[in-house]
Image (spheres, rainbow, N blue to C red):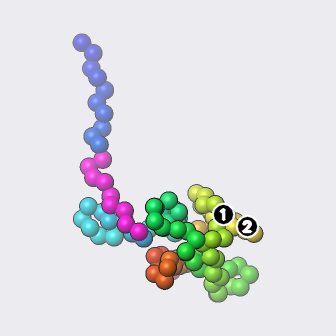
Amino acid sequence: MTRRAQRPPPFPFRRKVLLGRTLSPRGDAARRTARDVLNELRWRQGESLEDAVLHIRDRAMPGRLRAVPGKDIAALGRRTFDTATATIPFYKVVRIEYRGRLLFERAD
């Protein structure tokens, strides 16, 4: 008689994902990253990355923010996103606005 290897039980719950935040089973908002918010805007039906505005720390002007329109984003990577002129790491994103709403703000 052979013993079958037991599979681990399935993950006990699924998270509900809403634009700009993730709700755990208890209903409290979990911390979202800039990458999560941008991917959600890119892939969720009815949403558009073109309507977003990213405010990033600019190394040419220390202490100031530069606005990058979402329509300029060519690709989203694992740690960076690409525009036509630069590759920008996600840690430089300070704020993301979408159709006048604030979806992400880094707590520094």
Residue furthest front in the image: 46
Q: Is residue 17 visible?
A: yes
Q: Residue at x 64, y 87 (%)?
A: 63
Highlighted range, magenta? 11-19
Q: Residue at x 26, y 67 (%)?
A: 27
Local secondary structure at mark 1: strand
Q: Residue at x 32, y 65 (%)?
A: 23
Closer to us: 29 or 1 = 29
Residue 64 in percent (x, y) is at 65, 87
Q: Main secondary structure of the magenta part?
A: loop
| Up/down of 64 relative to 49, above or below | below
Residue 3 belongs to the span the image colors magenta: no
Closer to us: 79 or 18 = 18
Local secondary structure at mark 2: loop
Question: Is 88 left, or right, of 98 in this rendering?
Answer: right
Spatial CA span between label 1 and label 2: 7 Å
Question: Mark 1 is on which residue type?
Answer: Ala
Question: Is 101 left, or right, of 64 in this rendering?
Answer: left
| Residue placed under numbered mark 2 in the picture | 84
Question: Is 21 left, or right, of 2 in this rendering?
Answer: right
Asked whether the residues under the numbered discs 1 and 2 touch, taking CB atoms below 8 Å apart as contact, a structural biologist would say yes
Residue 33 in percent (x, y) is at 48, 67
